Image: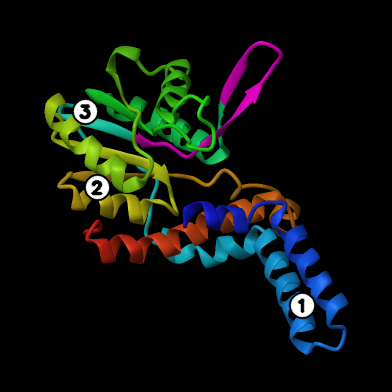
Amino acid sequence: MSSFVYSLFSPGAPAIVFLACALWIWRAPRSRAARRTALAAAVFYAAASIYAIPAAIGVPLTRGQQLFTGPLSGRGTAIVVLGGGGERVGGADRALSLMSRAEASRVLEAARVYALVSPDWVITSGGPDPAEPLQQPSSIVMRDALVGLGVAASRIRLESTSRTTHDEAVLIAPMLRSLGAERAIVVTSAIHMPRAFGAFRAAGIDAVAAPAPDPDASAPWRQRWLPAERGLRYSAELAHEYIGLPYYWARGWFAR
């Protein structure tokens, strides 16, 4: 389901949908259904690509969230940074694994919280992407970035096998116990926080939320109101959350 949602909002999806509609109209020029479908697709993708529209639809997911300011003792505390995907860029003989914008914002927020709290541990979480088997897991990419931002490497632990938010919660719970951490400051994107927070609570983790600001929220108004890839990307993330929340609740993976 996750891969389908992201494919539906990929940059190439509108072209495929419009091509299918054009072929339908060509085969059935008098079909009202074909024309209505083409119009609906045009309206749908126009709205999805304008960042301000999905951002407004996502407000219920972020309502009430605040930037983490503490105070919270670092003793017995672990910061848990959830991966947000990335990409692999290959050269002639080497390759780099890069963070997505969402993942980068989470790393920046984790570094800020680290400076405020000075926790005993930092756990970077995120396994390999099945579609990119040669790409480094998010846990490793985020660890390297955090070290570059001043986080002590000796305090960082990796969770490198998860593929879903539920996986992360289930795998991190025993890690926290083995580290002697009594609570976790969960760092993830604001729209992802409700599902992530619920999953960690369901796994028995005493969690504190530290939502990472959306990196596109402060973009100039032209970039927020003109159709662009950033809108499709945010629409995909939003759809993933609105589908994921009831699914997690139905599976018993969510607790308030």
In the picture, the quarter occupied by the C terminus is bottom left
As shown in the figure, which amino acid type bears the numbered disc 2?
A: Phe
Pick whichever of labels 2 and 3 is earlier in the sequence: 3
Residue holding disc 3: 74
Within-10-Å neighbours for mark 2: few <14, some 14–19, many 20+: many
Q: Residue at x 27, y 66 (%)?
A: 250
Pick whichever of labels 3 and 1 is earlier in the sequence: 1
Q: Residue at x 48, y 53 (%)?
A: 2
Distance Cα–Cα, label 3 vs label 1: 55 Å
Give the answer, above or below, for where 240 lies relative to 110: below
Does 21 lie within the magenta span?
no
Examine the rendering and report whether any part of residue 226 can be seen: no
Distance Cα–Cα, label 2 vs label 1: 42 Å
As shown in the figure, which amino acid type bears the numbered disc 1?
A: Leu
Q: Residue at x 47, y 31 (%)?
A: 108
Give the answer, above or below, for where 5 lies relative to 115: below
Which element is circle 1 on? helix
Residue 87 position in % (x across, y down): 58, 32
Along the line of sight, the residue nearer the viewer: 23 or 219: 23
Quarter of the rendering containing residue 60: bottom left
Q: Which residues are magenta?
A: 81-97
Does 86 lie within the magenta span?
yes
Count of numbered labels shown in the rendering: 3
Quarter of the rendering containing residue 98: top right
Residue holding disc 1: 39
Residue holding disc 2: 200
